Each structure stands twice: as structure tokens, then as C-alpha cells.
Amino acid sequence: MIDINLQIFDIILACLLDLILGDPYNFPHPVKMMGKIISFEESVARKVFKEKDLYFAGFLIVLLNICIAFIIPYYLLKICSFNFYLYHIINILLLYTTIAARCLRDEAFKIYKALNCSIEEARLKLSFIVGRDTKNLNDKEVIRATVETVAENTSDGVIAPLFYAIFGTPFAFVYKMVNTMDSMLGYMNQKYRYIGFFPAKTDDLFNYIPARLTGFLMIISGIFRYNIKEAFRIMIRDRKNHKSPNCAYPEGAVAGLLGVQLGGDNFYFGELVKKPKIGDKKRELEIEDIKRAVSIMFAAEGVFIGGLVFLILVKGY
């Protein structure tokens, strides 16, 4: 049984560490290792299984990786439990690797700066953080893609891992593994439609609560800056305007807060994927919306942390 107060304290320190350090490129990040594991499993599965049997291969990959993601941090922390300080230092470091707020901010700002210089450079920077094809995007489409990515990843990279971390650090790692599997395999195109089925559905399940929580946190965080009533209306109205059952919640919240329209068609691996619009086009997207989206992300994270602090104080009485 974890001490919820100490776990929350470790979560807060991990968030501060993320804000200070971000994700150094030479750091042996667990998500990079997860990516290598998934890539290896995919290559093996495609050699062993026939195309239609890749459904089952995808299921095995999900099952195996959930076990790996839970067991490794669980036993690492158990080994360190003989010493109070060592346990919490390791716990904070592990939690820190599951949070991506600073990294997301840095990547978004690289695109922001590139847009002021070269559309080609902006497309290249964008390609590092999105799955869609970027080589033919104009400046407005680059801005839209960046804002959408910040909005979606506020859930995937910030709020969701923090939410699962409350139940214990191994659960945060399980979430990161599930989300990484989805980002690598969960495409519904010809190449991934079989092997990616279970990774995508598992990610949908794990994000069901965090995505909705993220949308509400974003709206609450905008109470003194934006029309939160309008943002709530847009989020609820357009919550189904996405192929994912979850993504439209944070994207709808951001679209409503900023008074812009997100969503629409995109190309993935050369295939056109039609998507509905999210939000009302009260004005055109502009480059400063990238900074505004990042600001909303950090504000939502702050509201979440504030809620955790409030929980500790309430439990203390």
C-alpha cells in the first residue's frame, strides 16, 4: 500500500523536476526504451504471423508490454524500499520520466521560432511530434497541427501520467507504455489496421478519464483569461468530432478557449484521413496561438497539482 500523501508529494517534485530539466536528448529515457521494445516486437510479429493473424499479435504485444511496464518499476522501488530517502529519490526520478510538459513546450516553441524564418524548417520540426504528413502543409496548417498536438498531449503527456501516478508509479509507466504503443502501432491504415487494433483500443480505454479530466482542467484554468462558458459549450458539442473517443475533449477545450477552429482532414503515410472540425472559426489561427496553447497546458497542470495539494490538506484535517 502506498502512502498517498507521500506519493502526491513525490508527484509535485517530479513536476518541478520536469519544468527545470525537460527531456535532455542524451538522457536514457524509459520511453525511448519502450519504443525500441515495441519496434522489435513489431518486426518479429510481422515475420511470425500472417497478416490477418496480426490482430492476435497486437493483443500479445499489449499484454506483454503492460506486464513489463508494471513489473520493472514495481520491483525497482521494492528493492529500494529498505531506505526511505533512496526510495523517494528513485520514485521521483521515475515519475519525472513520465511527464512531458517541458518537452512539449520546447518542441512547440521550436516550431514557433521556425515559422518566423522558414516554412520548410517549421514542417521539419513539426514532423518530429506529429504522425501526419507535414511536407506540404502551409503556415496555417502547421500552426493548427501544433496547437492540436499541444492540446492532445496535455492529456497524453501531462495529465494522464499524473492521474495514474496517484495510484502508484508503476501505473504511470503502464500508461506511458500503452500510449507509446498507440503512437507507434495504433494507426487505422492498411499497414497497421490489424497489428494496431488492440494497441489503439487499449489506449482509448486508458485515456477515457484523463482526456475528459484534461478538458475540464483546461477550462477551469482559463477562468480569468477566456470565456470558459463558451469553451465548455464547444467541448461538449464537439466531443465526438474525432476518430478517437478522447482527443476531442482537450482539443475542443482549447478551440473553445481560443475561439478558433481545429480538426479537419490530414494525410497519414500518404493516405487522406477525413476528420470533422472542432470549434467555431471566430478568427483565423495565428502564430501566437502556439504560445497560448502551451500556456493553457501549463495552467491545466497547475490546476491539477493544486487539486492534489488541496487533497493533502483535506486529508490532514
Image (cartoon, helix red, strand yellow):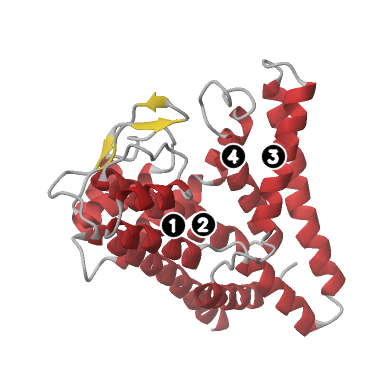
Compare marks 2 and 4 and give the one earlier in the sequence: 2
**Are the two marked residues, 2 and 4, in contact with CB atoms closer than 8 angstroms?**
no
The answer to whether residue 116 shows anywhere in this view is yes
Residue hosting label 2: 157
Compare marks 4 and 3 and give the one earlier in the sequence: 3
Q: CA distance from mark 2 to mark 4?
A: 15 Å
Q: Quadrant of residue 113?
A: bottom left
Amino acid on which disc 2 is placed: Gly
**Are the two marked residues, 4 and 3, in contact with CB atoms closer than 8 angstroms?**
yes
Q: In the rendering, which numbered label is found on residue 184?
A: 4
Residue hosting label 1: 154
The quadrant of the rendering that contains the C terminus is: bottom right
Q: Nearer the viewer, mark 3 or mark 2?
A: 3
**Are the two marked residues, 2 and 1, in contact with CB atoms closer than 8 angstroms?**
yes
As helix, strand or loop, the secondary structure at mark 3 comes to helix
Q: CA distance from mark 3 to mark 2?
A: 20 Å
The answer to whether residue 3 shows anywhere in this view is no
Q: Image point 38% across, 39% down: which residue? A: 135
Category of crowding for the residue at label 2, using alpha-carbon neighbours closer than 10 angstroms: few (below 14), some (14–19), many (at least 20): many
Residue hosting label 3: 39
Amino acid on which disc 1 is placed: Thr
Residue 39 vs residue 6, the one in the foreground: 39
Q: CA distance from mark 4 to mark 1?
A: 18 Å
Compare marks 3 and 2 and give the one earlier in the sequence: 3
**Are the two marked residues, 3 and 2, in contact with CB atoms closer than 8 angstroms?**
no
